[in-house]
Image (spheres, grey):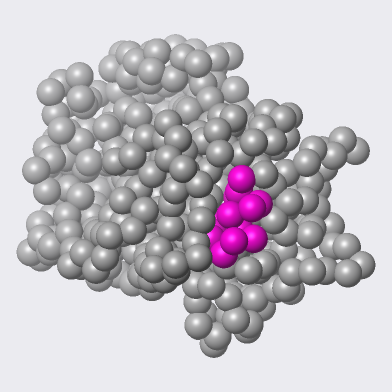
Amino acid sequence: MRRRGLSVGAFKKGPDYIDAGWLGLAAGQCFNLDTYLFPPETLISSFLFRSQGKDMAVVEGNRGLFDGVDAAGSYSTAELAKLLEAPILLILDCTKMTRTAAALVLGARALDEHLNLGGVILNRVGGTRHESVVRRSIEQATSVPVLGSIHKLALDNFPQRHLGLLPYQEHPGAVEFVEHAAQVIQQSVEIDEVVSIARKAKEMGRSIDAAPFSAARSCRVRIGIVRDSAFQFYYPENLEALEALGAELVYLSALQPSPLPDVDCLYIGGGFPETHAERLAENEVFRRSLRDAVNGGLPVYAECGGLMYLSRSLVIDDNAYPMAGVFSVDTVLQRSPQGLGYIRVEVTAENPFFPVGAELTGHEFHYSSIAMPEQLGDYFAFKVLRGHGADGRNDGICRNNALGTYLHIHALGTPQWAFSLVRKAAQFRSDPTRHVGEMSQANVR
């Protein structure tokens, strides 16, 4: 679409960082839409605001079209499509399949008559004859047009690992791959028909609201963001929410041998510390400065990979790599997922960011588990109501003003999160005894 001069708003359905990153690389930026995490009005407002000024919007679904959290398909891609009144392009994996593809299209159309099934794209087609048989089967049995056919691709330059696709930040030829993918689509899909279907989408009949985060700037604080190839999972809206409240974001790396800069709060997102364990362990300068800052009262909010980094060590195949040592627990990389899906917790103990009694909803996806010492110097602040968390019952490890959790929060679904970080940063900034560090070569925006 961009090759044709069109401005595209890209969206990813569900809680996802890696797919959204690739979509953002192709479209300029990508935002998440999640009917489980966001109230419907919030989701629609965000979609309309992010789509204004664009020629079209593309939303990538997740899982199967009707797959949700229950037998009714609640919070599925189909439900999101109906909420946005958007036509659907159904992608069919045609591996070892011919006329059964027609049955799948008929079933998708019949299961929910309110869906606008605009067309089908055949994927992983075995060859020209295979394509011809599948295409004729669908077009003879249904009124849904086949808009493209993509043959099986080797994708040797598109490696995957335990959390799915390799993040684009770690792919040395990411831009080249996106260009190759665009070429494949251009040769395999009837782009004019896709654009025509998009332009037939119904008017949503709603006005475009203000920016999702338009709060008056409350104060000027400096919040450090650990963002490098080891820690890369940040929703754009989370960073926007902090800036809207007056935070100056200071981007830094846990892989560079520099001490922590002078910040009022630190946010460490998720990522892949396990693939960078040796480099993180070798960077004793940053690890020591972070540990000293936490002992001095610096507020730190760490999600998933950030929690792993704040642990005493990261154990991979019986090799223990020293981490920041903020928490007196070890994290162990397992061979199967320990927590996967939506998670909901109740705040049951005092902590730096959330009031006791609050319920928080987010998602988790981690292969690591927590190895608890006999004498735990830290404590859990959350009780798990849904999901796994740290041990199936608890989550939210605390020490001083540092909180580590497997819960990934989206600022649109939990707006108090950004206020809490900025408020805590302001408190720390006004502390006359505070001392974090001197400004290094961090990138300040």
- Above or below: residue 17 compared with residue 126: below
Along the line of sight, which residue is nearer the eye, 381 or 60?
381
- Above or below: residue 50 compared with residue 96: below
What span is colored magenta in the figure? 289-306
Q: Determine the residue positioned at 9% across, 43% down.
A: 53
Residue 60 image point, x, y percent: 37, 43
Residue 57 image point, x, y percent: 21, 43
Residue 75 image point, x, y percent: 44, 64
Q: Is residue 100 left or right of residue 334?
A: left
Q: Determine the residue positioned at 22% across, 41% down.
A: 9
Q: Is residue 12 left or right of residue 268?
A: left
Q: How many marks?
A: 0
Residue 163 image point, x, y percent: 62, 40
Along the line of sight, which residue is nearer the eye, 208 or 347?
347
Is residue 256 visible from the viewing direction of this image?
Answer: yes
Quarter location, residue 141? top left
Q: Is residue 125 left or right of residue 2?
A: right
Q: Determine the residue positioned at 61% across, 45% down.
A: 289
Along the line of sight, which residue is nearer the eye, 151 or 129?
151
- Above or below: residue 259 compared with residue 391: above
Is residue 37 visible from the viewing direction of this image?
Answer: no
For the N terminus, which image quadrant? top left
- 292 in the magenta segment: yes
- Above or below: residue 217 compared with residue 91: below
Q: Determine the residue positioned at 12% across, 64% down.
A: 209
Task: Identify the residue at the far front of this view.
Answer: 432
Quarter location, residue 194? top left
For the C terminus, which image quadrant? top left
- 436 in the magenta segment: no
